[in-house]
Image: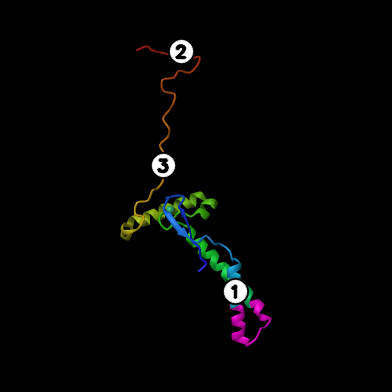
Amino acid sequence: MFNKKEQFFCAFCRSRRKISLKKNVTFVEGTYCVLAAILLSLLFWQNFDVRILFIFGILLAITEVILQMRWRLAISCPYCGFDPVLYKKNKVLTAQRIKNHLERRKKDPHALFSKNFYLDLPRPQAPPPPTNIGTVKKGKKLDLSL
Ligand SMILES: [Zn+2]
Protein backbone atom coordinates (compact mmCIF):
# COMPACT_ATOMS: atom_id res chain seq x y z
CA MET A 1 0.00 0.00 0.00
CA PHE A 2 2.71 2.49 0.98
CA ASN A 3 5.45 0.56 -0.72
CA LYS A 4 6.64 3.13 -3.23
CA LYS A 5 9.11 1.68 -5.68
CA GLU A 6 11.76 3.78 -7.30
CA GLN A 7 13.23 3.29 -10.71
CA PHE A 8 16.92 3.44 -11.39
CA PHE A 9 19.62 1.81 -13.50
CA CYS A 10 22.18 -0.75 -12.40
CA ALA A 11 25.58 0.87 -12.06
CA PHE A 12 27.30 -2.05 -13.79
CA CYS A 13 25.04 -3.41 -16.55
CA ARG A 14 22.78 -0.35 -16.91
CA SER A 15 19.64 -2.46 -16.68
CA ARG A 16 16.49 -0.65 -15.65
CA ARG A 17 15.43 -1.68 -12.15
CA LYS A 18 12.49 -0.85 -9.95
CA ILE A 19 12.80 -1.62 -6.25
CA SER A 20 11.71 -0.21 -2.94
CA LEU A 21 14.58 1.73 -1.46
CA LYS A 22 12.97 1.94 1.98
CA LYS A 23 15.61 0.75 4.40
CA ASN A 24 14.33 1.65 7.86
CA VAL A 25 11.11 1.72 9.83
CA THR A 26 9.08 4.87 9.27
CA PHE A 27 6.10 6.34 11.05
CA VAL A 28 3.70 4.19 9.01
CA GLU A 29 5.31 0.91 10.03
CA GLY A 30 5.53 2.15 13.63
CA THR A 31 1.80 2.83 13.57
CA TYR A 32 1.15 -0.65 12.23
CA CYS A 33 3.27 -2.09 15.04
CA VAL A 34 1.28 -0.12 17.64
CA LEU A 35 -2.00 -1.37 16.18
CA ALA A 36 -0.73 -4.95 16.05
CA ALA A 37 0.51 -4.72 19.65
CA ILE A 38 -2.90 -3.40 20.80
CA LEU A 39 -4.64 -6.17 18.88
CA LEU A 40 -2.39 -8.85 20.37
CA SER A 41 -2.89 -7.40 23.85
CA LEU A 42 -6.64 -7.51 23.44
CA LEU A 43 -6.41 -11.02 22.06
CA PHE A 44 -4.24 -12.45 24.85
CA TRP A 45 -5.33 -10.50 27.95
CA GLN A 46 -8.69 -8.95 26.89
CA ASN A 47 -7.56 -5.47 27.99
CA PHE A 48 -4.56 -3.16 27.77
CA ASP A 49 -1.58 -4.49 29.59
CA VAL A 50 1.90 -3.15 30.29
CA ARG A 51 3.29 -6.03 28.26
CA ILE A 52 1.99 -4.20 25.20
CA LEU A 53 5.20 -2.15 25.25
CA PHE A 54 7.27 -5.32 25.13
CA ILE A 55 5.21 -6.67 22.22
CA PHE A 56 5.49 -3.32 20.46
CA GLY A 57 9.28 -3.37 20.82
CA ILE A 58 9.54 -6.89 19.47
CA LEU A 59 7.28 -6.10 16.53
CA LEU A 60 9.26 -2.96 15.76
CA ALA A 61 12.54 -4.87 15.87
CA ILE A 62 11.16 -7.63 13.62
CA THR A 63 9.87 -5.04 11.16
CA GLU A 64 13.24 -3.29 11.09
CA VAL A 65 15.08 -6.55 10.45
CA ILE A 66 12.65 -7.55 7.68
CA LEU A 67 12.98 -4.15 5.99
CA GLN A 68 16.78 -4.30 6.19
CA MET A 69 16.85 -7.82 4.76
CA ARG A 70 14.44 -6.92 1.96
CA TRP A 71 16.48 -3.87 1.03
CA ARG A 72 19.75 -5.81 1.15
CA LEU A 73 18.41 -8.61 -1.07
CA ALA A 74 16.79 -6.23 -3.53
CA ILE A 75 19.72 -3.85 -3.96
CA SER A 76 21.91 -6.36 -5.80
CA CYS A 77 21.20 -6.64 -9.53
CA PRO A 78 19.50 -9.89 -10.59
CA TYR A 79 20.84 -9.59 -14.14
CA CYS A 80 24.56 -9.11 -13.60
CA GLY A 81 24.97 -9.83 -9.88
CA PHE A 82 26.43 -6.41 -9.06
CA ASP A 83 26.07 -5.55 -5.39
CA PRO A 84 26.77 -1.86 -4.66
CA VAL A 85 26.98 -2.40 -0.90
CA LEU A 86 29.63 -5.07 -1.32
CA TYR A 87 31.38 -2.92 -3.92
CA LYS A 88 31.89 -0.18 -1.34
CA LYS A 89 33.52 -2.68 1.03
CA ASN A 90 35.44 -5.04 -1.24
CA LYS A 91 35.85 -4.41 -4.96
CA VAL A 92 37.78 -7.62 -5.67
CA LEU A 93 35.10 -9.80 -4.12
CA THR A 94 32.44 -7.91 -6.07
CA ALA A 95 34.25 -8.54 -9.33
CA GLN A 96 34.56 -12.24 -8.48
CA ARG A 97 30.86 -12.50 -7.68
CA ILE A 98 29.94 -10.80 -10.95
CA LYS A 99 32.16 -13.23 -12.85
CA ASN A 100 30.55 -16.18 -11.10
CA HIS A 101 27.07 -14.82 -11.74
CA LEU A 102 27.80 -14.26 -15.43
CA GLU A 103 29.29 -17.77 -15.76
CA ARG A 104 26.16 -19.25 -14.17
CA ARG A 105 24.03 -17.13 -16.45
CA LYS A 106 25.96 -18.28 -19.48
CA LYS A 107 25.30 -21.93 -18.64
CA ASP A 108 21.63 -21.42 -17.75
CA PRO A 109 19.35 -22.00 -20.76
CA HIS A 110 16.57 -20.01 -19.13
CA ALA A 111 18.70 -16.90 -19.42
CA LEU A 112 17.89 -16.87 -23.14
CA PHE A 113 14.32 -16.00 -22.26
CA SER A 114 15.31 -13.38 -19.74
CA LYS A 115 14.00 -9.87 -20.12
CA ASN A 116 17.55 -8.52 -20.15
CA PHE A 117 19.32 -11.13 -22.23
CA TYR A 118 21.71 -8.64 -23.78
CA LEU A 119 23.52 -6.97 -20.94
CA ASP A 120 25.29 -3.74 -21.67
CA LEU A 121 28.36 -4.67 -19.70
CA PRO A 122 31.35 -2.37 -19.52
CA ARG A 123 34.17 -3.63 -21.70
CA PRO A 124 37.81 -3.47 -20.70
CA GLN A 125 39.40 -0.49 -22.34
CA ALA A 126 42.42 -0.85 -24.55
CA PRO A 127 45.48 1.06 -23.40
CA PRO A 128 45.80 4.43 -25.07
CA PRO A 129 48.09 4.52 -28.09
CA PRO A 130 51.54 5.85 -27.40
CA THR A 131 51.69 9.53 -28.12
CA ASN A 132 55.44 9.79 -28.63
CA ILE A 133 55.43 8.36 -32.17
CA GLY A 134 57.22 10.73 -34.48
CA THR A 135 58.51 12.98 -31.74
CA VAL A 136 62.10 13.44 -30.81
CA LYS A 137 63.18 14.09 -27.28
CA LYS A 138 64.71 17.43 -26.72
CA GLY A 139 68.49 17.41 -26.77
CA LYS A 140 68.84 14.20 -28.80
CA LYS A 141 69.90 14.13 -32.41
CA LEU A 142 67.54 12.59 -34.88
CA ASP A 143 69.26 9.58 -36.49
CA LEU A 144 68.05 9.25 -40.06
CA SER A 145 70.82 6.95 -41.31
CA LEU A 146 69.85 3.85 -43.19
ZN1 LIG B 1 23.26 -5.14 -13.23
Instruction: Tell me which label, 2 or 1, sits earlier in the chain.
Output: 1
Q: Is 57 rendered above or below residue 107?
A: below
Q: Is 146 rendered above or below residue 59?
A: above
- Give the quadrant of residue 35: bottom right
- State yes or no: discs 2 and 1 in contact (Cβ < 8 Å): no
* Amino acid beneath label 3: Pro
Please name the residue that numbered disc 1 is placed on.
Answer: 33
* Amino acid beneath label 1: Cys
- Give the quadrant of residue 105: bottom left
Mark 3 and mark 1: Cα distance apart in space:
50 Å
Q: Per the image, is 38 magenta?
A: yes
Q: Where is residue 127 in the image (x, y as percent from the top left)?
A: 42, 35
Mark 2 and mark 1: Cα distance apart in space:
83 Å
At 43% from the left and 32% from the top, the residue drawn is 128
Please state the extent of the stretch shown in magenta in the rendering. 36-54
Instruction: Tell me which label, 2 or 3, sits earlier in the chain.
Output: 3
At 50% from the left and 69% from the top, the residue drawn is 1
Q: Where is residue 82 in the image (x, y as percent from the top left)?
A: 46, 53
Nearer the observer, disc 2 or disc 1?
1
Q: Decide if ligand 1 comes within 8 Å of the CB at mark 1.
A: no
Please name the residue that numbered disc 2 is placed on.
Answer: 141
- State yes or no: discs 3 and 1 in contact (Cβ < 8 Å): no
